[in-house]
Amino acid sequence: MATTALPSAPPKKVNRIGLDISAYKGSKSTLCAGCGHNAITERIIEAFYELGVEPHRVAKLSGIGCSSKSPAYFLGSAYGLNAVHGRMAAVATGTMLANRTLLAIGVSGDGDTVSIGAGGFVHLMRRNLPLVYIIEDNGVYGLTKGQFSATADLGSKLKTGVVNDLPPIDTCALAIMLGATYVARSFSGDKRQLLALLQGAIAHRGTSMLDVISPCVTFNDHEGSTKSYSYVKDHDEPLSDVSFIPFFQDISVDYPAGTATEITLHDGSRMILKKLGTDYDPTNKSDALRILTEAHDKNEIVTGLFYVNTERENFLDLLNVVDEPLATLPESRVRPPKQVLDEIMEELR
Amino acid sequence: MATTRVAPQEAEILPPPPTVVNDLSIQVATVNGSGSQTANTVLLRSIFQMGIPVSGKNLFPSNIAGLPTWFTIRASKYGYIGRKKEIDFLVAMNPETAEEDVRELRPGAAVVYDERLNLNRLRTDLTFYPVPFDQLVAPVCPDAKLRKLVRNMIYDGVLAKLLGIEMEEIQKALDKQFRKKAKAAALNWNAAKAGYEFAEKNLRKSDRFALQRMDATRGKIIIDGNAAAALGAMFAGVTVVTWYPITPSSTLCETLIEYLKRYRIDPETKKATFAVVQAEDELAAIGMVLGAGWAGARSMTATSGPGISLMAEFTGFGYYAEIPAVIFDVQRVGPSTGLPTRTAQGDILSIAYLSHGDTQHPMLFPCSVEECFTMAIEAFDLAEELQTPVFVMSDLDLGMNNWMSDPFPYPPKPISRGKVLSREDIERLGHFERYRDVDGDGVGYRTLPGTDHAAAGYFTRGSGHNEKAQYSERPDDYVNNMQRLARKFATARNRVPAPVIQEAEGAEIGLIAYGSSHWAVVEALDQLRDEYDIAASYLRVRGFPFNDDVRNFIRRHRRIYVVDQNRDGQMAQLLRVDVDAEEVPKLHSVLHFSGLPIDARSVTDSIVSQEGVK
């Protein structure tokens, strides 16, 4: 009967702005089952959900490749721009110039970033544009069926037996050298670390560059590959135990003096880096570069937050752009009045 | 017989030839980097200030210092401001080219030259005016280091005396040139005076040319096309400018930066209502423009042919993803090292279909500095109304040379942002489909990133999407979308600036031209009429795609001459694609592609020859 009370569904869990996690999901992934990129997508969804970011404020940018398809798989109601190969950096820059109130997240791959997009990548890092830049790094070209990319390690082997005979480009070392202000490496299989690093990247107002090793289950997950699940698990050396405390949570963390580094990000969120052996200062560029160089020498994959700088001015502040989006300034603010034209004409007489 | 040729020194015994007033061309031949620009600009301005219609063209090499460079000034009481092929007055300052420059002159021309060059030995049918430049410059410029720069002002003084340019106007032009640098102005003024006084004492006027004050430049301005386009962009309300330096477009963005800094800083916050980025290459420049256009900014870049090539992929993306963008192409001669500082209309065909897949792009063709200004404004409106990249096709001649013009009109219409839906619009409508042809004109409605409505956001891709911007590789979705884009391009036919038609009654032939060729063509029409009794109609194309006026003009005439500043008749080719098959044989080409700006005589000669007139 109509009067019979139905058992009510348990209330949906919502985040601080009242949205449940479905608001942060996108369309169904068309990538291979088990692809590292899908795990990264999951973490991106969690990160935005937990931080309570309004989806309409997010601009998702990408180039071309398996990685670049993934923005369709998270934040379905956000704006997305899937551009051309290697040009995520350029469209992301234009987007943020047009509307500095957006939160831009760019997803790229290793080929998209350091081969065809190398020019754009290095100049983006110099500018410190507010942007979360994620490289889903698997060392191969997936969509064209398994050619080496420029992050493939020396000696790594393709399924066909071809051995890579050129040294890899370390995207983190490059980013640190060139001026990015939040630089980290993670592994798609390390849920906890990746989530914390992503949240920190979103909270940081500058270029956050995250290189996430993301094994390609179809073309680069075999014996002899240095980007396979098993190889990365065996060689992953986390620098520190990373946790993220958002600005809206008043949590105090106790740790014995000298055992952890605490970093306060632009919005007041905090990163707590508990030491795991390696002694380094994440605000020191030389330390970061030393760690990366030594890891290469030892054939280790070091993960964690290498470098963070909350002091450097971001690109939009450097350009002294007005606070409102340039995109929607009214005519009265972008078309000078007639007397200005008259004045200029007089000068040209 | 010895008496058949009269040496110019003895010319006074013959009756003086009729004086040619306010109709001459002066060519100054110097060495790049020798500071001749000031002297040439002052000369140009002085003539302008005397009320005589004038134009100036800098014909310069791709070089910072050392290679030959020429500056041509044309004064014309008829108001012709295209390049004049024939040189009447040569100022020979460059030893390397002097002899060739002199040999190319027509009989009766005059030569002012550095006396050490002994040019008077070369010809007997010219008037020679030797000037001891080094001797004259030393006393007026004690600092030896500056002499190279000041030396050129001496020929301004000499020409003033020989041609009748008023010295007060030279002084006025110098003051304008140097504004607050009184010392530099004085130094240059003294040099000009030294030249004038030398000519007064030592040179006997024996050529036919003279300049006299008239009243045909009152109220007019002098500006180059790049600066005019920059002004247009500022008054169009541009907000994002990304660019990569390339000759001859660099000064467009550089001038724009100066104007934006002066007039687009928010008075309260002192912050910029614009963002300018010098990108790492043209790939990035156009990518930033499209990212910004997608996010709702009025964004632009300026480049030239090589940059256009690099922008090809992204331009196609902009076409498919339907993102507004304005691209100024200041055209020049072809690729790589060679003639990057020479003019051409070389990118017409490649831009019409730039990129892969089925792509077509609107082009606007300014012919004057005023149109560089007005079409810049129109281009921004058009790009947002059509949601597609729009190209403004200038060239080196228009962009980098100084042109006389009426002052520019203030934009007559408010800014048009095209079809953009706000949060309130979507609430009212209850739905939003990015690529649906609601109005039947092929143009959908868009929302801007940041719009606070759950249905506002959409995912933008190149070729594979349906009406709702969802990923699709379905054949019917692709076909429908491509047909809608074709409808949109048809809409553009009557949205781009309409052609300007000048009909000659009963004319069998019609000329079609565009861009900077206009000035040579209007003069050629007069030559054809006055010298050959040929009446011709004229249609100036101002936009692509063409509208019915262009097709009807071709139908109305028996023979059509399409004037192109390129080898392959690129505009003629576009017209052949557009007109009915039976009209195609009517189309003939007048081509000019030497790297120099087109001139009327070349147009006239080509038409006369093709018409079979003896």
Image (cartoon, helix red, strand yellow):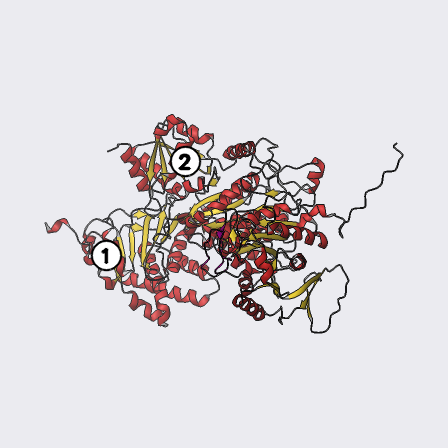
Local secondary structure at mark 2: helix
Q: Position of residue A290 (x, y in %)?
A: 55, 70
Residue B99's tag is: 1
Residue B33 to residue A86: above or below: below
Q: Is residue A342 visible?
A: no
Q: Position of residue B275 (x, y in %)?
A: 57, 55
Q: Position of residue B409 (x, y in %)?
A: 53, 44
Q: Residue furthest left?
A: B1
Instruction: Using the image as rendered, state which of residue A219 and residue B100 is in the foreground.
Output: A219
| Span highlighted in magenta in the image | A146-165
> At x 43% / y 37%, what residue is drawn?
B541
Local secondary structure at mark 1: helix
Q: State which quarter of the image contains the C terminus of chain B.
A: top left
Q: Position of residue A36 (x, y in %)?
A: 60, 52
The picture quadrant where one finds residue B539 is top left
Q: Residue furthest right?
A: A3
Q: Is residue B336 visible?
A: yes
Residue B574's tag is: 2
**Is B463 on the left or on the right of B454, as rendered?**
left
Mark 2 vs mark 1, CA separation in Å: 43 Å
Instruction: Using the image as rendered, state which of residue B497 and residue B418 is in the foreground.
Output: B418
Instruction: Work out whether disc 2 and disc 1 sit on a shared chain.
Output: yes
